[in-house]
Image (cartoon, grey):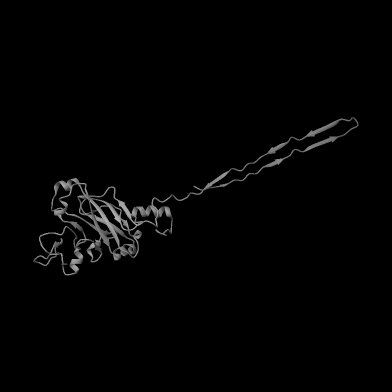
């Protein structure tokens, strides 16, 4: 904390005046002596303290190549944002590039014990300003798994996976193998944008053990978040914890982190500059 000191000192001294008078033949002497008076005036010392802005809790690191965000208390209720009211701040994602995300999840004790195959273990990366599912549009999310929106756009199937149609022409919510249409893909993006594990997979997990999903956001998806001033939240089907997010780029912040940084950085500050 810088301190600026301003001090003024002044002193005024009035010296005594001595006056002597002599008169008469009697050699009588009359002496008048004025009393000496000294007045000292001292100005108060004034201290002016200029507050330096608090150091931000997070700082931009130009050498960072990865960001890890731990969700300390994830919401496990059905169809809620695992990050509660927080979300990934889009403006902190890099411009004009894809971003790969690794999401780490773990079943709750209740879900693992029930092993109810009707329950879904699924989560949807969503735009924070609308809750619109990013993966519901073709070519917005990709990974080592089939993407329902891409299959629907390409005639319902690729060489390994397919969407099914019922007698009324409605497209299935889930993705199935082409080699056996009764077998669901182990991991896939539903046409509505939820990234889902097959129940045949997740019902073999133990409570608390971690499993990961790796997906890549397209340049278009990242640009939309940056340009619209939005970000990314994670709507979850419930019964599991979204514990950690790892990004393939440095300096990614949650919205709350970004607000803390902006407050300490001051008006006009731009993240990364």
**Residue 226 x %, y %:** 34, 62
- Please tell me which residue lies in front, 6 or 138: 138
- Please tell me which residue lies in front, 98 or 118: 98
**Residue 126 x %, y %:** 26, 59
Horizontal relation, residue 21 to residue 239: left or right: right
**Residue 8 x %, y %:** 61, 46
Horizontal relation, residue 68 to residue 238: left or right: right
Quadrant of the frame with the C terminus: bottom left
**Residue 249 x %, y %:** 33, 58
Of all residues shown, which one is farthest toward the right?
25
Q: Quadrant of residue 152?
A: bottom left
Total residue callouts: 0
Q: Quadrant of residue 23?
A: top right
Of all residues shown, which one is farthest toward the left?
167
- Please tell me which residue lies in front, 91 or 12: 91
Q: Is residue 272 above or below residue 19?
A: below
Horizontal relation, residue 5 to residue 231: left or right: right
At x 23%, y 51%, the residue is 105
- Please tell me which residue lies in front, 1 or 230: 1
């Amino acid at each position: 904390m810088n301190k600026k000191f301003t001090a003024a000192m002044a002193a005024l001294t009035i010296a005594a005046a001595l006056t002597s008078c002599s008169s008469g033949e009697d050699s009588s002497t009359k002496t008048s002596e004025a009393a000496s008076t000294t007045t000292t005036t001292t100005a108060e010392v004034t201290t002016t303290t200029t507050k330096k802005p608090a150091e931000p809790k997070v700082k931009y690191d130009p050498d960072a190549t990865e960001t890890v965000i731990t969700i300390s208390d994830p919401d496990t209720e059905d169809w809620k944002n695992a990050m509660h009211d927080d979300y990934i701040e889009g403006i902190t994602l890099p411009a004009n590039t894809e971003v790969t995300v690794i999401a780490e999840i773990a079943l709750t004790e209740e879900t693992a014990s029930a092993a109810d195959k009707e329950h879904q273990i699924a989560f949807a990366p969503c735009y924070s300003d609308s809750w619109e599912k990013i993966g519901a549009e073709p070519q917005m999310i990709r990974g080592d798994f089939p993407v329902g929106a891409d299959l629907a756009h390409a005639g319902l199937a690729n060489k390994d996976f397919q969407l099914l149609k019922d007698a009324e022409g409605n497209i299935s919510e889930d993705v199935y193998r082409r080699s056996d249409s009764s077998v669901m893909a182990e991991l896939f993006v539903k046409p509505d944008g939820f990234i889902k594990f097959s129940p045949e997979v997740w019902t073999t997990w133990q409570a608390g053990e971690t499993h990961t999903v790796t997906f890549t956001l397209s340049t278009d998806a990242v640009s939309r978040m940056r340009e619209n001033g939005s970000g990314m939240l994670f709507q979850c089907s419930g019964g599991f914890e979204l514990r950690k997010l790892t990004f393939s780029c440095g300096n990614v912040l949650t919205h709350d982190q970004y607000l803390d940084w902006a407050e300490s950085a001051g008006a006009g500050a731009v993240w990364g500059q």
